[in-house]
Image (spheres, rainbow, N blue to C red):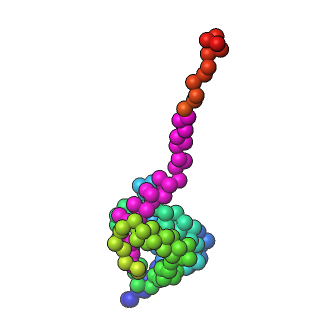
Amino acid sequence: MAQKVLVEVVDDLDGGVATQTVPFSIDGVQYEIDLSEDNAAELRDVLARFVSRARRTGGRKMRLAAGQSGGRSRTTTAEERKFTQEVRQWAQDNGYAVSDRGRLPSEVQQAYEIAQQEAAKPAKKVAATRKRSPRKNAAAK
């Protein structure tokens, strides 16, 4: 007697059919959630603002299993391209050897961020030293 077992993965948010399992981590705890294409794309869109400004601390980009498209291919946004152009121009102006295309070295990105933080600090006002003319002693007259 033959058996056929069908496993259906259910979207953890809306109960529909899930097409992928999305792993993520926050506060040192790792999670997985089963999501449809639309819900997975929405999760990635919500996190994109934070991910674009975060430091990567390790790990590798996860390859999805066959049939898990990830919602879409990775494309850079106009904001990310503008930021990369600013960093690249700053690096070239400040003596870093960077190519006109491709990934920027993390050292250059960190140096740029430090420079931006320094530039954002309010400048200390230096009190102008002014020499006063000596007061005339009224009693001496």
Examine the structure image and report whether residue 48 is included in the region drawn in magenta: no
Of residues 122 and 132, the one drawn nearer to the viewer in this rendering: 132
Query: Number of labelled discs?
Result: 0
Q: Quadrant of the C terminus?
A: top right
Q: Quadrant of the N terminus?
A: bottom left
Residue drawn at the location 54% of the way across and 76% of the way down = 77
Residue 27 at x, y percent in the picture: 45, 54
Can residue 11 be seen?
no
Residue 21 at x, y percent in the picture: 46, 73
Give the quadrant of residue 93: bottom left
Of residues 137 and 108, the one drawn nearer to the viewer in this rendering: 137
Residue drawn at the location 48% of the way across and 58% of the way down = 116
Of residues 105 and 48, the one drawn nearer to the viewer in this rendering: 105
Rendered position, 55 above or below 41 = above
Residue 136 at x, y percent in the picture: 62, 20
Examine the structure image and report whether residue 116 is included in the region drawn in magenta: yes
Can residue 130 be seen?
yes
Of residues 13 and 61, the one drawn nearer to the viewer in this rendering: 61
Span colored in magenta:
102-130
Residue 44 at x, y percent in the picture: 53, 71
Left or right of 103 on screen, residue 20: right
